[in-house]
Image (cartoon, rainbow, N blue to C red):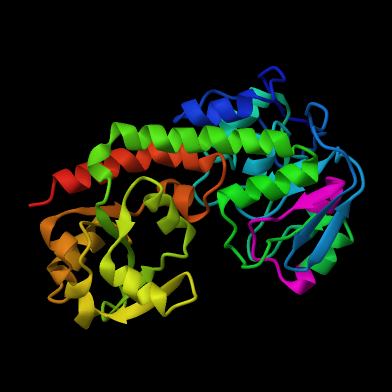
Amino acid sequence: MRTTFSGALRPAAAVAAALTLATLAACSTDTPAGTTTSSTSPAASTSFPVTIEHAFGETVVEKEPQRVAAISWANQDAIIALGVTPAAMPFASYGGDADGYLPWTRPALEALGGEAPALLDEGDTLDFEALAAAAPDLIVGAYSGITDEDYDKLTKIAPTIAYPEVAWGTSWRDQLTMTGKALGKEAEAEQVTKDIEAKLASALDDAPELEGKTFAYLWFNSSDPSTITYYTTADARVAFVESLGLKSSAKIAELSGSNDQFFGTISAELADEIDADVVLAYVDSKEHLEAVKADKLLGKIPAIASGAVIALDDPTFILSTSAPSPLSVPWAVDQYVPAIKDALESAK
């Protein structure tokens, strides 16, 4: 059985949906897994062929793709934001609803209308069999961590776009740029970028108290409280919070200067040096956060002690910025700004 979304074909509405909808809308989906669909989009705004450079070389797209597939976490969002319904995309087992859709992806797909994408079961490996069954003529993995072996297998199915340099390190802006070029929609990609930047600017105007506040993105291991994992200034989720007017704390900036990775660890003995106004904390649960607060070392982090902390224990909330995409960023703005304001206001 093929699944369809009820909305009429309105490509520009995909981005509008992402910029205005924060909750799920009703959908006519019944059995999404295993279905296929053709891409639905207006004519390309740029001419073909186009060449996309990436970590595994370059990919030439000879003509406008008609069946575009997305792999890994965020790539379907750039495709949809440009008004194209993917032929296949991953089932969102982390942070998604029972049907495998994320709350920012589903309304945008509904706005496009047409047949639902085939949903790929990406557990430990890519779902090569289902991907091949969807018969794509282009595979987009601009945000991914695919290996040489994965890339070889993918290119036997269809021309494939990989990440530009660093695995899992492609910004939402670069996702749009690469995908827009591959789809012949560079002008549309530029417009979507402007729309998202306007959304960020508006959020900053509405919350001027965030400007200049410092923050740290931390992960606490419940089985080993002797170390703290921090995310560096090169990390996409850190960049997202900085786009809201905040800046990394002095300690995180210092640690980032000698670390070319997106994260690092420090001893809990140095906890009191993490001098941020607010901490965004990955924890297992609210009970785990209370254990962090009570810990004789971790509890010395100034923001933890004062209560200026945001517990990151919800998969959807986490995924919106840990894998930031052109659709998740507008959604995340509406979630993170009030959460940060509340954390700052609750500081003792």
Image position, residue 15 (x, y; %): 59, 30
Image position, residue 268 (x, y; %): 23, 79
Name the residue nearer the viewer: 277 or 33.
277
Q: In the displayed structure, does residue 9 sit left or right of residue 328? A: right
Please tell me whether residue 141 is drawn above or below residue 220 in the rendered image.
Answer: above
Residue farthest along the top direction in this orientation: 8
Please tell me whether residue 28 is drawn above or below residue 50 in the rendered image.
Answer: above
For the point 83% across and 65% down, the residue is 153
For the point 32% across and 40% down, the residue is 337
Q: How many marks?
A: 0
Please tell me whether residue 5 is drawn above or below residue 48 in the rendered image.
Answer: above
For the point 12% across and 76% down, the residue is 296
* Magenta span includes 229: no
Asked whether residue 175 is in view, the answer is yes
Asked whether residue 92 is in view, the answer is no
Q: Quadrant of the N terminus?
A: top right
Image position, residue 140 (x, y; %): 74, 51
Image position, residue 81 (x, y; %): 64, 35
The part of the image, by quadrant, that contains residue 187 is top right
* Magenta span includes 134: yes
Q: What range is drawn magenta here?
A: 131-150
Residue farthest along the left direction in this orientation: 348
